[in-house]
Amino acid sequence: MRNHPECRSDEIHIGNCRRSIEFSWRTQRLGLVAYREDVLPSRVFVEGMFPVFVKRSEIVKIGIASHGSLRIMFQKMLEEGQP
């Protein structure tokens, strides 16, 4: 979600997950309230899910080391995460 209200200025919101799911991001942080942006009105609460945030610097570091479609995906995350 672009501009998630819990997202800090040095983070990117990469999506939502259940608390039991673990990611391999070193700087990941779980938020409190997950929202869906694909339904109207926007910011519809999603029960049982939590937002996941990752430091922008980690995405930049991994994105630069990636190739092809993976690198494009990381670049898109950075662009969409701009305030």
Image (cartoon, rainbow, N blue to C red):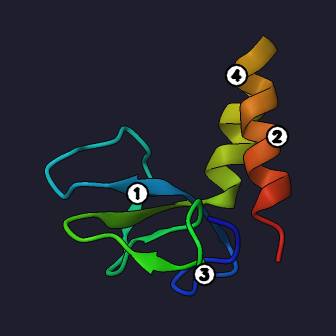
Going by the numbered disc 1, the residue's amino acid type is Asn
Residue carrying label 3: 8
Residue carrying label 1: 16
Q: Describe the element under mark 4 as helix, strand or loop.
A: helix
Crowd band around label 2 with a 10 angstrom C-alpha radius: few (<14), some (14–19), many (20+) = some
Point out residue 80 in the picture as x, y percentages from the top left corner.
Answer: 80, 58
> Which is more N-terminal, label 1 or label 3?
3
**Which quarter of the picture shows residue 13?**
bottom right
C-alpha distance separating marks 2 and 4? 9 Å
Going by the numbered disc 3, the residue's amino acid type is Arg
C-alpha distance separating marks 3 and 4? 24 Å
**Furthest-front residue in view?**
40
Number of marks drawn = 4
**Which quarter of the picture shows residue 62?**
top right
Q: Describe the element under mark 1 as helix, strand or loop.
A: strand
Residue carrying label 2: 75
C-alpha distance separating marks 1 and 4? 19 Å
Confirm whether residue 66 shows in the render.
no
Question: Taking 11 as reference, is 41 above or below it?
Answer: below
> Looking at the rendered structure, which numbered label has been put on residue 70?
4
> Which is more N-terminal, label 4 or label 2?
4
Along the line of sight, the residue nearer the viewer: 81 or 65 = 81
